[in-house]
Amino acid sequence: MSSKDEIDKLDIGIIRELQKDARMHFKKIAAKLGVAEGTIRNRTNRLIRNGVLILEARVNPIKFENSIAALVGLRLKERNQQEVMKKIKKLPGITSVWNSAGRYDLFFEVMTDSLEELNLLLFGKNQGLEKIGGILSSETFILLESYNKYYKIK
């Protein structure tokens, strides 16, 4: 974002209201924040257009019987995070992937219908992570309970 598009207190207020209820009418947000409805609409559209805000439906994986949600940390053989991230996001069940600092080079979230599907993604011959290659090691964390972590359904 350019300097003229910096996020200000009003933008933060809009984001906070939409986090409470992404379907909240702009008129209601405008009344709460003391500005015109058009201002809320324009600001929200700018935040979406600039990649600051996304409004989408996500699910609590715990509410889906027989689904497995996991967070996987990866250590790479080379410093090619961007290339590997692009490949990982195309794999089935991947809900998000990000570059990180610390013990792992990358993390990704995955939601599958079974442990078998997760196993194929992680260790399947000529599929999943093996197909991507360049991975030194991985560590998988299975989600057992969640109060505020929601996933996309793929």
Image (cartoon, helix red, strand yellow):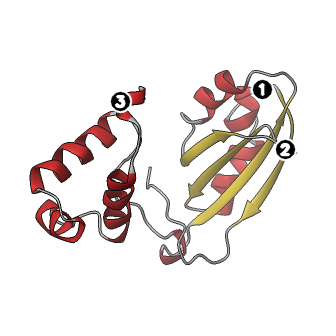
> Where residue 147 sits in the image (x, y, percent)?
55, 78
Task: Give coordinates of residue 22: x percent, y percent.
Answer: 29, 63
Q: Residue 43 sits in which quadrant?
A: top left
Q: Residue at x 72, y 27 (%)?
A: 81
Q: Nearer the viewer, residue 84 or 148?
A: 148
Circle 3 SS class: helix
Residue shown at the point (67%, 75%) measured from the top left: 144
Q: CA distance from mark 2 to mark 1?
A: 21 Å
User: Which numbered circle lies on residue 133?
Assistant: 1
Image quarter where the N terminus lies is: top left
Instruction: Find numbered disc 2 in the image and state the secondary structure of the residue it sits on.
Output: loop
Element at badge 1? loop
Q: Which of the 4 image quadrants contains residue 88?
A: top right
- Check if mark 3's residue and mark 2's residue have beta carbons within 8 Å: no
Marks 3 and 1, how far apart at CA: 42 Å
Question: Which residue does the numbered mark 3 point to in the structure image?
Answer: 4
Q: Earlier in the sequence, mark 2 or mark 1?
A: 2
**Residue 63 bears which disc, if any?**
none
Q: Amino acid at mark 3?
A: Lys
Write the residue at 31% across / 58% down.
14
Looking at the rendered structure, the kind of residue marked 2 is Gly
Local crowd size for mark 3, using a 10 Å CA cut-off: few (<14), some (14–19), many (≥20): few
Please name whichever residue, 20 or 85, is drawn nearer the observer in this view of the structure: 20
- The reply, left or right, for residue 8 in relation to residue 64 is left
Q: Nearer the viewer, residue 65 or 145?
A: 145
Residue at 60% x, 52% y: name it. Answer: 110
Q: Nearer the viewer, mark 2 or mark 1?
A: 2
Residue 7: x %, y % from top left: 40, 44
Sequence order check: which comes first, mark 3 or mark 2?
Answer: 3
Identify the residue under disc 2.
102
Q: CA distance from mark 3 to mark 2?
A: 33 Å
